[in-house]
């Protein structure tokens, strides 16, 4: 029996190598499909979670009130009419030079607040900005 | 172990073997089945020596036969042996020695140092070591005081040959090992790739766990979805508003001034004072690109630009 098997030694070696390859292929496919089913679910959940965290960090920023208050200090108090109630702001900026106007607009653009109303008007050389926002 | 198997000396006068060891046997060929040459060559490796072997035997061998070559490094020289596999195989078969039963094939030349006395080959010939070369001579020329010996396992050299075609295999040894090596290589690649997929999965799970530890309020799927939908909506609307303001700011350049801007949750409207027609056209073109609504103000170059959010 052993001698008979020895006669086919080469075929047996190739068959065993082929079997090993098949096992490896099945193992890899198993891993791939598990990643595609459970894994891709986990991956999309992770991406979704990261997105929610990023959005929360921007639009749910707990320090936003302090950041909004800094808007008031960009120009001299005489040019500002300020009304902050809870998480709502109504502000009017008058007699702004172009530089002051630019500074105010850049600050507003970078604040993570919901702009409810933004009115800008220019008279001769000065600008007036009316802002209503909440967060 | 190959070296533990019985060693049979193969010579032309050997008798028919009715039975052999079921575990297989090793064979040692006498010079009747090979041609030998010793050369001192400036080569370092056996494969280099094997490459030049055919040229060394030029004129010594019959052209009609297909010879194979065996090389072995000796103390000072290279031992070259030319042999005809087909001739050996047919002889072995004729002597009742199944090829499948042969483990390794050796040449008497390899163990020449061990042949310190003659070995009788049948009734007429003897195998002797003459100046380091194995030679078959008639027994009648042996000295009377020379006591013949018999070979045993201890004569088995270290390096042997597998007799090609000894098995019923359809594929040769070289092909087998090459094919097996390729298949094993691919298997290893697949195993590594597979384990990497598993690794990615575990990494993602660990990252997810860490994030949820830092944001426990997001552990509930329902809560997460509700927060996501709320913020996504705000993000989309507010980004749009800021994009509009940014686009309108690009329409302010020499000759074009923003005189008013009104923006709320749903719409926006801006008015630009333009110094001349060409400036007005340039602002118009920029607004058109953004698909904003444009309405010229009569009796001036000024423009009203608006749109929905």
Image (tube, helix red, strand yellow):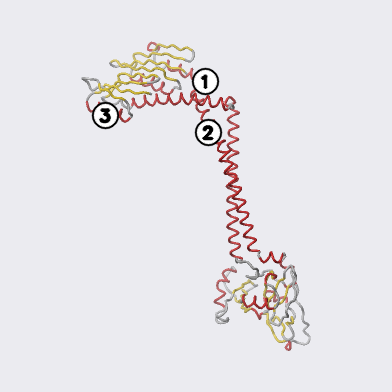
| Label 3 element class | helix
Q: Earlier in the sequence, mark 2 or mark 1?
A: 2
List the residue tagged with mark 2: A47
Note whether B36 is above or below B229 in the view shown: below
Check chain identity for marks 2 and 1: say if they share one.
yes
Question: Residue B159 in the image: x percent, y percent?
Answer: 67, 69
Front residue (pair B74, B49): B49
Which quarter of the rendered picture does the C terminus of chain B lie within?
top left
Give the quadrant of residue B142: bottom right
| Label 1 element class | loop
Mark 2 or 3, closer to the camera: 2
Give the quadrant of residue B139: bottom right
Question: Residue B155 in the image: x percent, y percent?
Answer: 73, 73
Front residue (pair B181, A36): A36
Give how far apart the Cα atoms at labels 2 and 3 are.
Answer: 43 Å
Which quarter of the rendered picture does the N terminus of chain B lie within?
bottom right
Check chain identity for marks 2 and 3: say if they share one.
no
List the residue tagged with mark 3: B282
Question: Residue A64 in the image: x percent, y percent?
Answer: 48, 20
């Amino acid at each position: 029996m052993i001698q008979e098997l020895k006669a086919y030694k080469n075929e047996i070696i190739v068959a065993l190598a082929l079997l090993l390859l098949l096992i490896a292929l099945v193992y890899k496919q198993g891993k791939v499909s598990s990643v595609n089913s459970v894994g891709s679910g986990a991956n999309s959940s992770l991406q979704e979670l990261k997105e929610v965290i990023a959005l929360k960090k921007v639009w749910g920023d707990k320090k936003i009130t302090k950041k909004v208050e800094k808007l008031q200090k960009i120009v001299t108090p005489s040019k500002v009419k300020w009304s902050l109630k809870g998480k709502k702001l109504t502000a009017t900026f008058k007699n702004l030079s172009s530089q002051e106007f630019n500074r105010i607009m850049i600050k507003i653009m970078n604040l993570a607040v919901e702009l409810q109303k933004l009115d800008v008007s220019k008279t001769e050389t000065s600008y007036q900005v009316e802002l209503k926002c909440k967060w | 172990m190959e070296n533990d198997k019985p060693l049979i000396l193969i010579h032309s006068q050997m008798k028919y073997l009715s039975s052999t060891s079921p575990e297989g046997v090793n064979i040692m060929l006498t010079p009747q089945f090979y041609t030998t040459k010793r050369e001192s060559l400036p080569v370092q490796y056996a494969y280099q020596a094997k490459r030049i072997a055919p040229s060394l035997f030029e004129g010594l061998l019959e052209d009609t036969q297909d010879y194979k070559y065996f090389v072995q490094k000796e103390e000072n020289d290279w031992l070259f042996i030319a042999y005809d596999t087909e001739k050996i195989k047919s002889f072995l078969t004729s002597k009742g020695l199944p090829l499948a039963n042969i483990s390794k094939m050796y040449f008497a030349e390899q163990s020449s140092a061990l042949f310190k006395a003659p070995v009788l080959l049948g009734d007429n010939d003897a195998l002797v070591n003459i100046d380091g070369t194995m030679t078959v001579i008639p027994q009648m020329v042996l000295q009377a005081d020379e006591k013949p010996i018999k070979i045993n396992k201890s004569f088995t050299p270290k390096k042997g040959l597998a007799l090609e075609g000894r098995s019923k295999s359809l594929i040769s040894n070289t092909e087998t090992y090459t094919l097996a090596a390729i298949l094993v290589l691919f298997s290893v690649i697949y195993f590594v790739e597979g384990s990497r997929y598993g690794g990615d999965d575990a990494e993602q799970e660990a990252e997810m766990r860490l994030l949820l530890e830092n944001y426990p309020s997001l552990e509930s799927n329902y809560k997460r979805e509700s927060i996501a939908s709320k913020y996504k909506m705000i993000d989309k609307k507010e980004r749009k508003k800021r994009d509009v303001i940014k686009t309108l700011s690009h329409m302010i350049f020499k000759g074009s001034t923003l005189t008013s801007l009104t923006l709320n949750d749903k719409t926006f409207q801006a008015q630009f004072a333009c110094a001349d027609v060409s400036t007005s056209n340039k602002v118009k073109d920029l607004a058109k690109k953004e698909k904003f609504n444009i309405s010229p103000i009569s009796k001036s170059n000024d423009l009203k630009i608006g749109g929905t959010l």
